[in-house]
Image (tube, coloured by chain):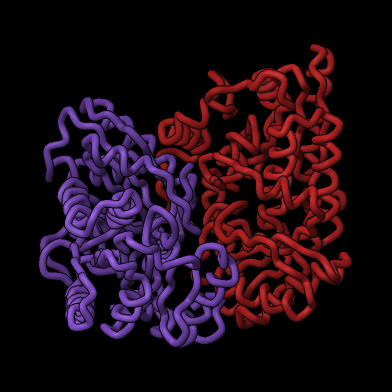
Chain colours: A red, B purple
């Protein structure tokens, strides 16, 4: 295992310390919990957003804590759901009196623990609502999921529901906007290499030198199939086709997220984005905005996912709103 | 070679097409040249900044073309200097009448070709000045360098000289500010893995499973030594010590760039940054601002570099100024 770490068991805590040292203007850590919240929060009268999940997906989710996106992010152990008490602490810390929306990726453990935290908050009279992101079109059920998995499309929910909250919408409205975003986004990924969870010390699966895994999940869960590595254009076309088959995007305006899984050079993401653009252009689908980079990663995995979000005027305005967080800033 | 590409010889051109498709609001490509310039440029009366070099260091340099940073970026073949005519085209395209500053990383090929472009511009009566970045404290001479290499610290020059130009400083002043930034920044890196230039098809060097290369360059040039992989804290301490030995930072305020080489998870960069912060704190050196992420990469290399910039009031103000580019936005 080649990693720049100190001790496999300490990676999450040391990472969070490093985040706070790097970005004190944006975030602080709750004493005794692996929770990052806005440095200057809670924001009075604003609906607060909390997300999180297992670590290893950086910058998700702590990197998106800041104005116009999240209020709090809960970091579980690597690829492991955070416990309910951690989520509950986040909820208490960010509530500004207008309630808290939990943005949960669809994994059985995450849902159970976030929902339990919601019940704990309810008992303390904090209004909590939740939404579950299930954007991955690859497989219907997986190792850790009933139904579709939540992957990189989640970042669109952070951005858009975050902007809705910042704009002063109430909890019901922010939830409505988040659900519309979830309904409108589809993703699919692939990978050239596995990744190694520090505490495990060895890769979670193996791929031959000429092999790729198509449709795998962000924890290395199996995808739809293995295949010989194809060209970037062929790989990209396959991912985009699966997305376009799943929802009617015709005549739409969309936002694209060309996401790297952590170990893929930006060069390759842009080469893939070239093909995404050209397919969408051919189909008469207009790209309003494109994001390229590492947004939802799987440690050092080499691979990528494509997310395509169908926009309406409301989503477009919220997507374009100002945001200022450690990992995403938009004027 | 596991890469998402179409053809090894086409990577740079296809990448640039992907960049333009992703970020038309920021950049356009000069027809027939591997040059990106601001979408809405040239800016009349403003000093323009051009940088560039071999490709494979993305987001450097095209990702930094935009308001408050560069006006143009020239992309050579992977790890290969761009030719003089490409640089000259960039200069002509961005000149807004106030002259052009070339920001060159210290590699023999880059210097030769950028200087030749400067002479070509001179013959067309475009005012051109140039600065050479040599921030790498690891080795005094290298495979492709006389003197110290230019590495990730270069991004500070883009940011600060870019802000100076945006503020309306003239060419002499922008050059003065760039030279002060160069004089004040030091960097050093290390790597856990090599990377593969697409056209070569195999890694440029080999490292054993328990080995790291300390002080290597961003093209995989040899560093100071190979060593058994140490803990993140030990590795980071070594890099920071070499930097602090090289310049007197005592009583200073600094900016830190904790840079990933492309294949390193953000988690590890933050774990390293935790140690950078604590060493600087112990020494009484105040960190004004920290940037963590992939700024100057070496394709998919796993590794990192630390850059530390000594600030004065002028540099601080320019560092903090607004910037808006594909890879770096600051409110």
Q: Nearer the viewer, residue A95 or B97?
A: B97
Q: How many marks?
A: 0
In the image: residue A218, left or right of residue B288: right
Outermost residue toward the top in this view = A124
Residue depicted at x 43% and y 70% = B37
> Is residue B125 shown above or below A12?
below
Above or below, A43 relative to A195: above
Report which quarter residue A5 is drawn in. top left
In the visual, does A174 lie left or right of B133? right
Near-viewer residue (B126 or B198): B126
Name the residue rendered at 65%, 38% in the picture.
A69
Which one is in front, A244 or A17?
A244
**Up/down of A129 relative to A6, above or below:** above
The residue nearer to you, when weighing A78 against B15, is B15
Give the residue drawn at x 68%, y 53%: A152
| Residue A64 image offset from top left, x and y in percent | 59, 40
Q: Quadrant of residue A102?
A: top right
Q: Compared with residue B302, is residue A52 higher up or lower down, i.e. above or below?
A: above
Residue A120 visible, this angle: no
Residue A137, position as x, y percentages in the image: 81, 62
Q: Residue at x 33, y 33 (%)?
A: B288
x, y percent for residue B313: 24, 34
Left or right of residue A289: residue B280: left
Where is residue B166? Give x, y as percent.
35, 52
């Amino acid at each position: 295992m080649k990693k720049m770490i100190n001790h496999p068991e300490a990676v999450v805590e040391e990472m969070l310390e490093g985040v706070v040292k790097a970005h004190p203007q944006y975030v602080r850590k709750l004493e005794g919990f692996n929770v990052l919240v806005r440095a200057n929060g809670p924001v009075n009268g604003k609906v607060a957003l909390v997300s999180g999940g297992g670590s290893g997906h950086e910058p998700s989710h702590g990197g998106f804590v800041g104005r116009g996106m999240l209020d709090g992010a809960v970091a579980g152990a690597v690829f492991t759901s955070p416990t309910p008490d951690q989520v509950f602490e986040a909820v208490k810390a960010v509530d500004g009196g207008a309630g808290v929306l939990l943005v949960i990726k669809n994994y059985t453990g995450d849902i159970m623990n976030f929902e339990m935290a919601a019940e704990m908050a309810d008992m303390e009279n904090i209004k909590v609502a939740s939404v579950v992101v299930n954007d991955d079109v690859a497989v219907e059920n997986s190792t850790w999921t009933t139904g579709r998995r939540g992957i990189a499309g989640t970042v669109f929910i952070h951005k858009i529901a975050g902007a809705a909250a910042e704009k002063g919408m109430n909890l019901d409205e922010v939830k409505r906007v988040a659900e519309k975003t979830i309904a409108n986004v589809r993703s699919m990924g692939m990978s050239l290499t596995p990744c190694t969870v520090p505490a495990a010390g060895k890769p979670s699966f193996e791929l031959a030198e000429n092999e790729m895994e198509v449709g795998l999940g962000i924890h290395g869960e199996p995808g739809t199939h293995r295949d010989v590595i194809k060209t970037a254009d062929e790989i990209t076309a396959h991912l985009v086709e699966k997305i376009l088959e799943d929802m009617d995007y015709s005549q739409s305006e969309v936002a694209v997220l060309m996401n790297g899984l952590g170990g893929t050079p930006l060069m390759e993401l842009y080469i893939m984005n070239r093909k995404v653009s050209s397919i969408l252009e051919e189909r008469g689908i207009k790209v309003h905005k494109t994001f390229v980079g590492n947004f939802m990663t799987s440690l050092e995995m080499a691979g990528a996912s494509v997310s395509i979000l169908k926009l309406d005027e409301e989503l477009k305005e919220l997507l374009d709103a100002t945001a200022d967080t450690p990992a995403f800033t938009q004027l």
